[in-house]
Image (spheres, coloured by chain):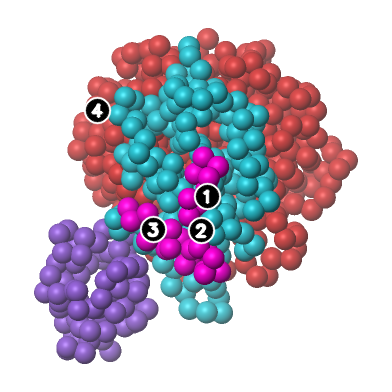
Amino acid sequence: MDELIEKLKIQIIEQLNLEDMEPEDINAKEPLFGEGLGLDSIDALELIVLMEKEYGIKIQNPKDGQKIFRSIETMASYIQMNQK
Amino acid sequence: MAYFIADNIISSLGFTTVENFNSLLSGDIGIEKMEDADIYPGPFLASTIDKTRLENEFRLLAHKYSNFSKFTVLEKLMILSIDDALSQCQPDVKSDKTAFIFSTTKGNIDLLDKSKKDEFGPDRHLLWKMAEEISNFFGNPNKAICISNACISGVLALNTAAMYINAGQYETIVVCGGDLVSRFVVSGFMSFLSLSDEPCKPFDKDRKGLSLGEAAGTIILSEKPSASKQGIKFMGGATANDANHISGPSRTGEGSYIAIKKALFEAGMRTDQIDHISAHGTATPYNDEMESIAIARHNLQKAATNGIKGSVGHTLGAAGIIETAILLEEMRNNTVLKTSGYKNHGVGEQINVSTENSGLELNTCLKMASGFGGSNAALILQKI
Amino acid sequence: MGKLFINKYCHIKNNKVFLDGKLVFSDDEVHDIKPFLKSVYRFLKPAYNKFFKMDEISKLAYLCSEYLLQDVDLSAFNKDDIAIVLSNSDSTSITDQNHQNSISKEGGFFPSPSIFVYTLPNIMIGEISIRHKLKGENAFFIVENFDAGLLTNHINNLYLTRKAKVFIAGWVNINNDSYEAFLFLLSPCGKKYNKGEIEKVYNQHKYI
């Protein structure tokens, strides 16, 4: 799990162009949207692409994204549960 | 004064404005389920043009013109569209008092595909080049003007044409818009999760996003009204930016509200003079909600409002042109078309979305448009 | 009706930034637009994180507008009276190609929404509008070469029809060979302005 969380941090920084940010700056429990990392709606869509591209997981309903992308931790546990 | 003297629409519903209008009157829907791996790996919905008819009609047109060279699919559509509009009013296209304004978001974007790359030379995918090829075909001496401002391109091009005519710079301006359903655009909107899996439902409670369409449309504006058609003039037009988000519309309808306010100011009119609104109505949750707010902020809830994207889809750079051409036809027929796809009211404000075709004396109408980049546009037309 | 005046202009090309004709920044160490734009950002320090989300052409347009509007007080004007009129020849061709690469039949099919959204040239206008809360008239023209006549004609018309009072206008282009941004600010107060004047200041850096 910890390994997956670290990998996700790096992928998110790269995919979402979070310049000036290092993996250690991101708290895995912190909200990704709103206050936390301050991501927006296009970032949410980009995370859906990331899930499919890197982990082969298709999120059909964008509304599910709200739960899955609450934090890096929720993302990681979703990946563990759904990855074939 | 600038007058609307001729128009054409080429879409899934037909090759003239009248064909399209009649098809809309009968409630036809041109959006269909498609499977075309060249455009998208899975099934998708789109409103597309009959390409066999395009080739046939284009061959017929060849007899009328001498300077024939090779044209892309979109250029053929736009040439056919312009040719039909010109045939209704015969302006002197070879005069420097006639100008061409083009409106497109992606133009010949299908040429980026490797298989088509070398067919048309190195710069044919550039929008100014496409505009130049078409205006050269008609022998117009002025440099073609090309506007690419997302989904407000068409309305912005019409506003711009009227402004230049009002300033006395040109006697006639041919405004032509066009965009294709391409792999580029379909996959982009897919990645935005904004495509509906059924024909789109503007302003409906169950709307799930937009449907894409392809079209070419032409409207000719002139300093003199048409001798044969009901005279309709440009009263006011404006654009405004939400200054809020590059893809999401403003939650308060800010830019759209300002664009309508400024168009009314130029027209010297009050909102209670507006008989009918042709909305942008993409059927994405946010766009339609935003438009309803902008309409309500102007106290225009009672004005009969409709949109045609539930039938022809969102035709991007052509949308503002073909939807205005339909609006002109509605005015000539004193008919408000029903909004295809709309059943149950699904926006926060109680705006008056049309559910049936209905007869209504239409003197003054408003066209709205909004798009990526926070852009919004409004245009007010009136019978003379 | 009064007249419009040219208040300021900024030109970015070949790793150099000129403000009102004077060189204000250059970086000879970098050989590509990407690191150059980053280098300009580091120098300006606008603390605007959205910058990193933009594609290259929006970054270029944004930085040029940042220079143009630095220390400019537009508070006397309504936000919806400030128009942005831009132009270029290549639209968003570099980003178009990026999107195209992500949907090629040979490679994987993973279109990216954050790339696709930048395949419209007026997104540059959107980015400048968001940064400075500008809500006025917009227009993006695609034209083979920088055309002062086209821009000044459109601007004069908007001004005379009272649709805008202040204008941020110019040219922002990137293709495989070069990049260039040239923006100017016009308002009803300041120095004289006409097509010839715009051409003159644009051509100042023709051979750089």
**What secondary structure is marked by label 1?**
strand
What residue does disc 4 label? B296
What residue does disc 1 label? C23
Vertical placement of B195 versus B268: above or below?
below
**Sequence-first tag of 2 and 3:** 2
- Determine if marks 4 and 2 fall on one subunit: no
Chain coloured red in the rendered structure: B
Magenta residues span C17-46
**What secondary structure is marked by label 2?**
strand
Q: Which mark is residue C26?
A: 2
Q: Mark 2 and mark 1 in contact (Cβ < 8 Å)?
A: yes
Foreground label between 1 and 4 = 1
Q: Is residue C156 left or right of residue A31?
A: right
Position of the N terminus of chain B by quadrant: top right
Chain coloured cyan in the rendered structure: C
Foreground label between 4 and 2 = 2
